[in-house]
Amino acid sequence: MSRQRLLILLNPRAGAGRGEARLRGLLKSRSELANRARVVAIDPEQDLRRVLGGLSEHELPVAAGGDGTVNSVVLGLRGTDSSRSFGVLPLGTGNTFAHTAGITGLGAAVDALEHGETISLAVLVTDRPEVPVVMVSLSTGFESGVVAAAHRWSTWRRYPAGLLCVGRLAGRRVTGIALSADDNLVAGPGERVFNVGVYNSPVYGCGRVVLPGADPSDARADAVVHRTAIGYWRAMRQGLPAGASDSARRSCRRWTLESPHGIQFDGEVGPAGTYECHVEPDAIRVVAPGPACVEAA
C-alpha cells in the first residue's frame, strides 16, 4: 500500500464544513502521506466517473468525507472499474462506513493506507436511479426526518439543526410505511412505527454497536422495525436484543420498502416511494487496517 500514489477525493462540506481544514492539518503533520497524494475537491452529488476514469493504475482513490462521500466514490467506481480498491479518510460526522471497515479515526485510516489490507464488502442495491447503491443504511421515519431537517440548513448549521430535530421528532410515530424482507411482511402500512430501515453494518454513527452479529461481508442485511421511540433508543444504548417486544429484526437478502415520508440513505436525502432492493455480495474492495497496522503501531 505504501508505494501507491493517492487521489484524495475531498468533500469540503464534510464534518459540518470542517473537512478541508482537518485534511490540511493531517497532510501537514504526515509529510510522507502528503508527498504521494493529490487532492481533488468534489461535491458528493456530482458524477465522479470522469475523475475516476482518469486514474493511473498506480493510484488509489481515497474518499475523504463521511458516508455520503463514500457512496459517491463507490458509485463512480461502479461506472468505471468496480474491481478497483479505494481508501477512506473519515472526515464526516458519524463515519458509519469507516467504522464498519474497522477504520476508527484518521490515525487508523492513515495506518491502513500505509500498511493495511484490502477487504471485500457487500453493498445494498436499489431499483431507484436516485439511490442506486447504499453503503450502510436505508431508512424512513425518525432517521429520515432528522436527515431531511438537517439538510435544509447550511453546512455548518446542520449538526445543531439535526440535534434540534431529534428533540422535535423524539417520540413521533407515523403510518403508511411497509417493509417486507424475503417476501415476509415485517411492517404493514397500517402500523404506527417510529423508524423502519435496512442496514448493512453492526454499527451506527461513531462506531456504536446497535446490531450485534451483523456482518457486512456475509451477503445479508438486517431489516429492522422500531415501533416505539423507547425501543429505538434502547437499541441505540445497548444494542437490539433478540425478542424485543417493540422492535423486530430480520436477516434478509432482498426486501421492499415503501414510504410516503421520504427516506435517508447513508446520511443523504432520498425521495418517498417504493424501493426494491437486494444485497450485492463482494461488491466493493476497501483498504482497511490489517495485522501489519497492529505491528506498525
Image (cartoon, rainbow, N blue to C red):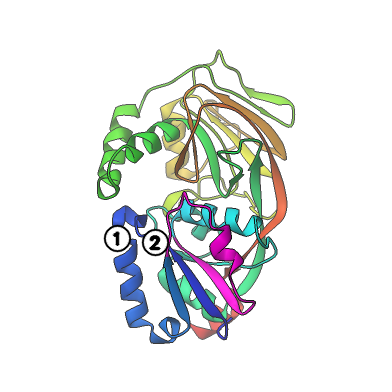
In the foreground, 152 or 138: 152
Q: Residue at x 32, y 68 (%)?
A: 22
Q: Is residue 65 left or right of residue 257?
A: left
Residue 214 is situated, as x and y percent measured from the top left of the image, at 62, 49
What's the residue type where badge 2 is placed? Leu
Q: Can the viewer see residue 142? A: yes
Nearest to N terminus: mark 2 or mark 1: 1
Q: Which residues are magenta?
A: 41-64
Q: Quadrant of residue 293?
A: bottom right
**Residue 235 vertical placement versus 40 (above, below):** above
Contact flag, marks 2 and 1 (Cβ < 8 Å): yes
Is disc 1 surrounded by few (<14), some (14 to 19) or many (20+) residues within 10 Å? some
Q: Is residue 45 magenta?
A: yes
Q: Which residue is mark 1?
A: 18
Q: Residue at x 61, y 65 (%)?
A: 53
What's the residue type where badge 1 is placed? Arg
Which element is circle 1 on?
Answer: loop
Tag of residue 28 = none
Mark 2–mark 1 Cα distance, whole angstroms, equals 8 Å
**Residue 146 vertical placement versus 61 (above, below):** above
Q: Which residue is mark 2?
A: 91
